[in-house]
Image (spheres, helix red, strand yellow):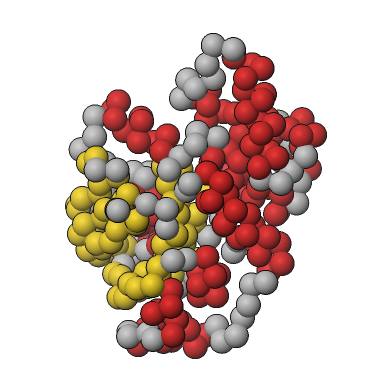
Amino acid sequence: MALVEVRDLVKIYQSDEGIFGKAKREVRAVNGVSLDVNAGETLGLVGESGCGKTTLGRMILRLIEPTSGQIRFNNQDVLNASSGTLRRLRRDMQIIFQDPFASLNPRMRIEQIITEPLVIHGRNGRSGKSRLHDEAVKMIHAVGLDEEALRRYPHEFSGGQRQRIGIARALMLRPKFVVCDEPVSALDVSVGAQIVNLLKQLQREFGLTYLFISHSMPVVRYLSDRIAVMRQGEIVELGTSEEITSNPKHEYTKTLLAATPEAKLQ
Ligand SMILES: Nc1ncnc2c1ncn2[C@@H]1O[C@H](COP(=O)(O)OP(=O)(O)OP(=O)(O)O)[C@@H](O)[C@H]1O
Ligand SMILES: [Mg+2]
């Protein structure tokens, strides 16, 4: 069953990059994309830098406003949702960023960072602080860190640990759907592999559906049930990981596969 349905999605950016700062330049970042993300699956989204992956992922969460098209989440119209519905939808849809450090407030302790979504969404309940603390402890353990981490600040952690904190924050509201936007691209290969395995484990534990964005075919292949190959704003091929990697139809998919021969994750 499709949890996310994307139809004819388009994003055109207007930029003022003319020689004299007057001419408008149009960038068709996403050019008529249609795809489904099925409940419980990982859909990998792969393609080279600038092809529109981030724009597509963020439009689904409505962090970027599409130029045209339709998005349905759990059978609800995302683009025409009332503010109340949108607020509810936002709890169910979260994002994990490439650079966790840039997305973690340096002046906040980890406990405050990861419980903030609960406070914002008024999910801290009647028991207030102690319930929030319990939730923080549970989640910090789920992402493989010690309870003691809650009292510390982002700069005290390594890149991999910070990504675990970013994941903890994304999962605090118990979302159904998570867009993972290059979550391991800034990490060493071995650290990245640990994070990928953590994401797999959390998917089972919390019943998550992922859109996993990456420019790396080996990473996407390892994690995804199906893979969408994106090029210059369009999906050129979509199939099971097996089909895409062992029997690619599109020339561009073949090029991507050839660029990363025998790289392994584990
Ligand atoms: N705010 C913006 N204004 C104008 N152009 C933009 C904006 N954001 C992105 N673009 C352009 O849209 C295109 C798609 O960008 P996007 O960031 O979605 O690609 P990407 O596939 O995520 O790339 P990367 O792999 O480098 O993260 C690029 O040509 C980019 O320069
Ligand atoms: Mg991107």
In the drawing, does residue 170 fall left or right of residue 137?
left
In the drawing, does residue 200 fall left or right of residue 43?
right
Quadrant location of residue 90?
top left
Residue 197 appears anywhere in the view: yes
Whole-percent x, y for residue 157 in the image: 76, 46
Q: Is residue 257 above or below residue 35?
A: below
Closer to us: 190 or 104: 190
In the drawing, does residue 114 fall left or right of residue 1?
right
Q: Is residue 203 above or below residue 136?
A: below
Q: Residue lying furthest top in this view?
A: 126
What residue is rendered at 34% in x and 73% in y? Answer: 239
User: The C terminus is located in which quarter?
Assistant: bottom right
Quadrant location of residue 151?
top right
Q: Is residue 112 above or below residue 178?
A: above
What residue is rendered at 70% in x and 53% in y? Answer: 159
Whole-percent x, y for residue 190 in the image: 71, 67
Closer to us: 33 or 218: 218
Q: Is residue 128 above or below residue 208?
A: above
What residue is rendered at 66% in x and 17% in y? Answer: 130
Residue 216 appears anywhere in the view: no
In the drawing, does residue 24 fall left or right of residue 223?
left
